[in-house]
Image (cartoon, rainbow, N blue to C red):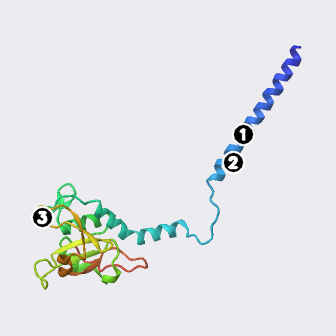
Amino acid sequence: MSSGGSLRLDTRCSVRATFARRAASLACLLALASGCAPFQPGLPSEPAAREARSSAGRGDTLAREARAQLGVPYRWGGGDPARGFDCSGLVAWVHSREGIVVPRTAAAQFAAAERVDDRKLRPGDLVFFRLQSRRGDVSHVGIYTGQRKFVHAPQTGRDVTEASLDDPYYRERYAGAGRFYEEPGGRGPRFGSPR
């Protein structure tokens, strides 16, 4: 009886071991297969998709970063969220987060930016204003966020805020728009030395 009982025990152990090996093999195959994605015609390769996201989304990234600064206090000459921003400091800081160096003053930013037709404004573009006189130098800048709105650091005593290009005050003082990031297709700004 001891030899017959031992045979049944060996058979059961052998069956369990075989089942465990097969289950483990099946689990490994499923894990490997889940990592494979089937080819889908018409979808770009990962490098092409990454390149399209980086150029098309750069302006959106600038606009999002500008919006993230809403509520930061205005500070004349300020250029970071910890100390506060003036208008051109906000623009310079937001662009620096994307590795883009821009001049420090609104007038120098206006002079160096690639001009953008008002009908082709995109998030991340800059909007410039002549606040002292309609014919004087550009003295104010904001970052366009879409839907005719822009983020800017307005003046002492006020925080970074979003305003509308349709506001009569800004509409009357609007000087134009510009861009410092490259468009899809390779067009970008004239890069001069930062002033």
**Looking at the picture, how far across and down is residue 122, in whole percent?**
35, 75
The residue carrying mark 3 is 76
At mark 2, the secondary structure is helix
At mark 3, the secondary structure is loop
The residue carrying mark 1 is 23
Q: Determine whether 109 is above or below 17 in the image.
A: below
> What's under tag 3, amino acid-wise?
Trp
**Looking at the picture, how far across and down is residue 78, in whole percent?**
16, 62
Q: Residue 29 carries which label?
A: 2
Judging depth in this view, the residue of 122 and 39 nearest the camera is 122
Asked which quadrant contains residue 103, the reply is: bottom left
Asked which quadrant contains residue 116, the reply is: bottom left
Asked whether the viewer can see residue 47, the reply is yes
Left or right: residue 47 compared with residue 174? right
Q: Determine whether 159 is above or below 149 in the image.
A: above
Residue at point 42%, 68% (across, down): 54
Q: Name, please, the residue furthest toward the bottom.
A: 135
Q: How far apart are marks 1 and 3 (CA)?
A: 69 Å
The residue carrying pointer 2 sits among few (fewer than 14), some (14 to 19) or many (20 or more) residues within 10 Å by Cα, namely: few
Q: Which mark is residue 152?
A: none
Quarter holding the C terminus? bottom left
**Looking at the picture, how far across and down is residue 100, in whole percent?**
30, 69
> What's under tag 1, amino acid-wise?
Ala
**Looking at the picture, how far across and down is residue 23, in whole percent?**
72, 39
CB within 8 Å, label 2 to label 1: no
Task: Of the two numbered discs 2 and 3 on the same chain, state the one appearing first in sequence.
Answer: 2
Task: Of the two numbered discs 1 and 3 on the same chain, state the one appearing first in sequence.
Answer: 1
